[in-house]
Image (cartoon, coloured by chain):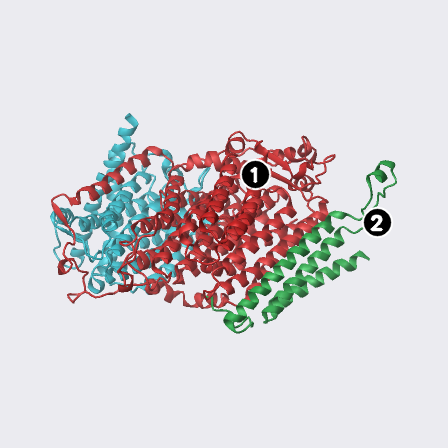
Chain colours: A cyan, B red, C green
């Protein structure tokens, strides 16, 4: 019984749903603010994503004629649940919600679920714009998956799991013993690759081909309105946090004060830095890519960086 | 009593095959009753073996005509069932039973159904015989019956355009494979002077000669043809596409599992060659090529069934890679993935059949918006699609997880970069699988419904039932994989690593010890990410959320408005302010950016699948030669 | 000389594979499959052959009296060959019937024209 209560606490409050939502909205707000400042605008207040979300919750939800109701309404929920769940598997420095359950493959697959939810939801709306949008979303997914996988393998090899290969705990422990991954020079290309994977996964400016507002009217989201739309927006804010948290725990781990609260605060600060670095900055300085350029970019340049790192690590550096 | 069950199950199917032909060629009821009865009874007979073999750990041996071994030499044909056989036999039984149920409604508009059920039962019987037998030559005979029945069933709808052609190609490549198996069996006999697997295993233990290496190479090539690993896969794609869908399901569910079984049985048990790194590397590389080429070909297909066919090939690649690793985790993953492949690919083929039955086409460019017309089929399809793409918590995830772990653990242990690359390929293939199922989802089930499909109806219940059963099994195997591992996979893995019991119960106590065979105990896999409580809480939340959506259809203060009036523009699809019109993003329109970047690759690959039977056989023979040569060069 | 048999059987197998790979006529492809089968059958029969051995046919009384020959040709491969020949004949029959049907439908038995399924 006590166990179930703890599980509920983990899943619903910390580090699950509530924490992820809160930090995700914070990151989204900071992102918008920073981009605005870089473009010499004042920008919205940092709480703006929260206001947007609350406003959308109150709006009416229209289900188009061509849509499949269950998939149309269910998709955002599925994405939300899986995003809330990922944080249980990412160690916050020393702390993981379930110490035995940290595993990279689970994270890798759970991270694809929000994308799939977006695709299924968009596809079920029956709109041709959504059709084009999901096609692009899927190609983007295939594009960043290769470098992402290579980065994960590199880190796993470097940390050298004990019994099973892809243990996040092993990585956290390795960093606690040997300092952060980022300070291993062989890991630097992988870190850069990972920083480039994050914006594509989240779908921010240069890599937001799937939701290109100006050409295909937000693609998969074109028919969405009201609460489901709000939930999708929330999902993408949560994704920001999840991805930057993954970066922090893969490359910037090893800081252990022993107090979970202080750890969490340092963690969030590092996440903010990562977000500003890889999402806001790139967003502010670049224009949207074409889908085929995006694919080529990820499979040559980014994957090449990650591969270089993997080979270096394999050679024992 | 119980030792008669396996042979009775096989014979019953063959007997029923003839009974159907004699009594059932005119009367549909008699025909269906005979076929269904035979399938049910034989499935029950096999399922009755679960307790003694999987739980109590017995090995059942049976000598045809009671020709027991004389002074340690096997002279009769023996059936021998250990956990490995039984694991595959269960898959086979489940597949043909479900397919039989599905056939009754699905095939009812075809002619010559007497022949159909005859061939169907012969196919079932031969595959069941193949996995249960303990005799290499008997195995070859079963392979031949299997090939016959499959070819005839592939060409069954011989008024369709492609069936004959597909049947002929299947026959040619299949016969090449059978001839190789036969040559391998002959060499094996020449080496050991016995055809009994248990005895060959005892004789060959640690004593590989050039002849037996050659035999191993030929047999790997032969079973490679039967499991359609890559250069041999060409006829499979055609056959799966043109055969009636109930048969496509049988092909992917049990015919290529028979090939996988043969591979495991021969390599692990009979030759005990899995500790050789050359064999491991060979199988892993073939597996990797299979999964990659299969999935990339699938991405360009516009035909639902052909797309599934290439996925079937690609998933077998995972299985071969995993069993090729030769580690306990790898074999567990491979067997698990084989089982899951039977479940989800059978399910997907059945949904494809349902689409064909309801709409009359499987061309993905011509269908659309079926999820509103066929909700059960669409839901089952999504379960199958998510399973095959390996999303948690469906079953594909659990088995793929094991495959990746096994691969990368091997890579780190051996320091061999090739295994790391194969891991990358496996992970990428998974996302490409997802992509091509998104394509089917978008173009067949979602999107807009063309005018000519407006009055499509859901398929009859007897076709829905197998789909629902398989969908439930997919989810159940994904959630309770710890139990699956404990009761099904681990006994099978132990059986393939430890042949002592197999040899002893067949030839006589002490044979294995005399031959120097030893036991290695394999423990169940530890699922480090498994925490039932988290998943339980998760499911409660997901179901609560979805129930909330369905029951109230209300979010917080907002209202969900459903289209009530037909012509309210508010509910029309957005068309930049124009009048709504039919516009469907169909199968071949998707993934444009990807296809453009991969143009060169696809040019080569499509050129290889050029439909010419000569080229296909050349590919097969070259691949077989490569396998045999690799065996000779590296296996020392 | 038993070695001649092995060489001949390998030659037959290679010849059969060559026919299957190179001949465009589907009937010739079927013939090639047949030749491969014969090669394999020859291999099996040769495996059981013992130069100078007698036929493995004798009665129970011979065995009991000890006058049965102890050096004889292995009968198992011959049984295998018989089975294999029967199977081979069935394969050929089925393949030829498919070729007939293909000819009706495609008006050709050229492998280059019987390839509507591709890509």
Dot 2 alpha-carbon crowd within 10 angstroms: few under 14, some 14 to 19, many 20 or more: few
- At mark 1, the secondary structure is helix
Q: Exactly how many numbered labels are in the figure?
A: 2
Residue in view at x 18 percent, y 62 percent: B574
Dot 1 alpha-carbon crowd within 10 angstroms: few under 14, some 14 to 19, many 20 or more: many
**Comparing marks 2 and 1, which lies closer to the viewer?**
1
Q: Is residue B131 left or right of residue A163?
A: right
The quadrant holding residue A257 is top left
Residue A86 pos. (x, y %): 30, 42
- At mark 2, the secondary structure is loop
Residue C3 pos. (x, y %): 78, 57
**From the viewer's perspective, is residue A226 above or below residue C24?**
above
Q: Is residue B431 left or right of residue B569?
A: right
Identify residue for label 1: B6
**From the viewer's perspective, is residue B169 above or below residue A88?**
below
Q: Is residue B273 left or right of residue B569?
A: right
Q: Residue furthest bottom?
A: C107
């Amino acid at each position: 019984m006590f166990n179930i209560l703890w599980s509920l606490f983990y899943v619903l409050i910390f580090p699950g749903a509530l924490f992820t939502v809160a930090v995700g909205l914070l990151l989204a707000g900071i992102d918008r603010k920073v981009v605005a400042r870089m473009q010499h605008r004042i920008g919205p207040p940092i709480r703006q994503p929260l206001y947007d979300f609350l406003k959308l919750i109150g709006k009416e939800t229209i289900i188009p004629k061509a849509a499949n109701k269950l998939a149309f309404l269910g998709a955002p929920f599925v994405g939300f649940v899986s995003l809330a769940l990922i944080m249980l598997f990412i160690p916050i420095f020393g702390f993981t919600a379930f110490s035995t359950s940290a595993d990279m493959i689970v994270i890798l697959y759970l991270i694809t679920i929000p994308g799939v939810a977006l695709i299924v939801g968009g596809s079920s709306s029956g709109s041709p714009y959504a059709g084009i949008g999901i096609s692009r979303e899927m190609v983007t997914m295939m594009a960043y998956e290769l470098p992402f996988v290579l980065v994960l393998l590199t880190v796993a090899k470097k940390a050298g799991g004990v019994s099973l290969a892809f243990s996040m705990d092993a990585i956290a422990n390795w960093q606690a013993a040997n300092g952060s991954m980022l300070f291993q020079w062989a890991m630097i290309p992988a870190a850069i690759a990972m920083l480039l994977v994050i914006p594509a996964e989240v779908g921010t400016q240069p890599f937001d081909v799937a939701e290109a507002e100006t050409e295909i009217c937000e693609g998969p989201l074109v028919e969405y309105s009201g609460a489901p739309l709000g939930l999708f927006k929330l999902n993408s804010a949560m994704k920001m946090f999840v991805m930057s948290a993954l970066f922090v725990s893969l490359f910037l781990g090893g800081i252990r004060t022993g107090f979970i609260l202080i750890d969490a605060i340092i963690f969030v600060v590092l996440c903010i830095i990562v977000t500003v670095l890889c999402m806001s900055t790139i967003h502010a300085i670049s224009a949207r890519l074409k889908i085929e350029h995006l694919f080529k970019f990820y499979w040559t340049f980014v994957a090449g960086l990650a591969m270089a790192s993997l080979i270096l690590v394999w050679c024992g550096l | 009593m119980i030792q008669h069950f396996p042979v009775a199950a096989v014979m019953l199917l063959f007997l029923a095959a003839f009974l159907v032909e004699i009594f059932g060629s005119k009367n549909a009821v008699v025909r269906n009753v005979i076929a269904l009865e035979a399938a049910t009874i034989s499935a029950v007979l096999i399922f009755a073996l679960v307790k003694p073999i999987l739980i109590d750990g017995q090995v059942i041996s049976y000598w045809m005509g009671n020709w027991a071994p004389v002074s340690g030499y096997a002279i009769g044909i023996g059936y021998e069932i250990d956990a490995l056989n039984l694991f595959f036999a269960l898959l086979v039984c489940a597949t043909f039973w479900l397919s039989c149920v599905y056939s009754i409604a699905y095939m009812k508009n075809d002619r010559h159904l007497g022949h159909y059920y005859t061939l169907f039962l012969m196919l079932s019987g031969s595959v069941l015989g193949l996995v249960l037998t303990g005799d290499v030559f008997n195995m070859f005979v079963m392979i031949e019956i299997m090939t016959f029945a499959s070819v005839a069933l592939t060409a069954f709808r011989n008024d369709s355009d492609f069936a004959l052609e597909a049947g002929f190609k299947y026959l040619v490549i299949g016969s090449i494979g059978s001839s190789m198996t036969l040559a391998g069996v002959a060499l094996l006999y020449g080496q050991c002077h016995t055809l009994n697997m248990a005895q060959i295993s005892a004789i060959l233990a640690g004593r590989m000669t050039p002849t037996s290496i050659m035999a191993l190479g030929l047999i790997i090539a032969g079973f490679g043809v039967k499991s359609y690993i890559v250069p041999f896969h060409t006829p499979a794609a055609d056959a799966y596409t043109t055969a009636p869908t109930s048969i496509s399901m049988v092909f992917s569910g049990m015919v290529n599992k028979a090939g996988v079984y043969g591979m495991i049985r021969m390599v692990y048990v009979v030759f005990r060659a899995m500790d050789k790194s050359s064999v491991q590397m060979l199988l892993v590389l073939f597996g990797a090529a299979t999964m990659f080429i299969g999935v990339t070909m699938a991405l360009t297909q516009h035909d639902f069934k052909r797309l599934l066919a290439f996925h079937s090939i690609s998933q077998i690649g995972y299985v071969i890679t995993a069993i090729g690793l030769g580690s306990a985790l790898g074999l567990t993953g491979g067997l698990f993935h084989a089982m899951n492949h039977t479940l989800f690919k059978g399910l997907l083929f059945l949904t494809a059949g349902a689409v064909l039955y309801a709409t009359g086409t499987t061309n993905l460019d011509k269908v659309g918006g079926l999820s509103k017309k066929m909700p059960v089929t669409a839901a089952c399809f999504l379960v199958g699609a998510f399973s095959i793409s390996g999303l948690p918590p469906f079953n594909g995830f659990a088995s793929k997880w094991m495959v990746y772990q096994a691969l990368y653990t091997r890579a780190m242990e051996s320091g061999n970069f090739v295994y790391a690359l194969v891991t990358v390929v496996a992970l990428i293939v998974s996302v490409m699988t997802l992509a091509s199922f998104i394509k089917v989802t978008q173009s067949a089930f979602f999107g807009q419904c063309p005018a000519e499909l407006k009055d499509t109806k859901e398929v009859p219940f007897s076709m829905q039932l197998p789909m629902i059963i398989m969908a439930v099994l997919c989810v159940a195997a994904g959630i309770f994989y710890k139990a699956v591992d404990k009761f099904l996979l681990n006994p099978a893995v132990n059986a393939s690593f430890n042949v002592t019991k197999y040899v002893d119960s067949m030839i006589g106590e002490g044979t294995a010890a005399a031959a120097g065979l030893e036991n290695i105990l394999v423990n169940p896999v530890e699922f480090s990410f498994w925490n039932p409580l988290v998943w339980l809480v998760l499911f409660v939340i997901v179901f609560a959320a979805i129930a909330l959506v369905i029951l109230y259809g209300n979010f917080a203060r907002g209202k969900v408005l459903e289209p009530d009036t037909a012509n309210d523009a508010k509910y029309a699809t957005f068309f930049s302010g124009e009048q709504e019109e039919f516009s469907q993003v169909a199968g071949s329109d998707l993934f444009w950016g990807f296809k453009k970047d991969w143009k060169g690759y696809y040019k080569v690959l499509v050129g290889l699948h050029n439909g010419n039977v000569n080229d296909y056989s050349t590919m097969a023979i070259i691949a077989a030669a490569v396998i045999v040569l690799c065996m000779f060069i590296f296996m020392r | 000389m038993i070695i001649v048999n092995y060489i001949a059987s390998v030659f037959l197998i290679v010849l059969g594979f060559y026919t299957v790979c190179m001949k465009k006529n589907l009937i010739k492809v079927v013939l090639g499959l047949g030749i491969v089968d014969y090669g394999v059958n020859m291999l099996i029969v040769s495996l059981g052959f013992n130069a100078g051995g007698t036929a493995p046919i004798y009665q129970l009384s011979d065995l009991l009296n000890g006058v049965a020959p102890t050096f004889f040709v292995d009968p198992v491969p011959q049984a295998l060959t018989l089975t294999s020949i029967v199977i081979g004949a069935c394969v050929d029959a089925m393949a030829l019937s498919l070729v007939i049907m293909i000819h009706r439908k495609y008006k050709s038995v050229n492998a280059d024209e019987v390839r509507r399924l591709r890509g």
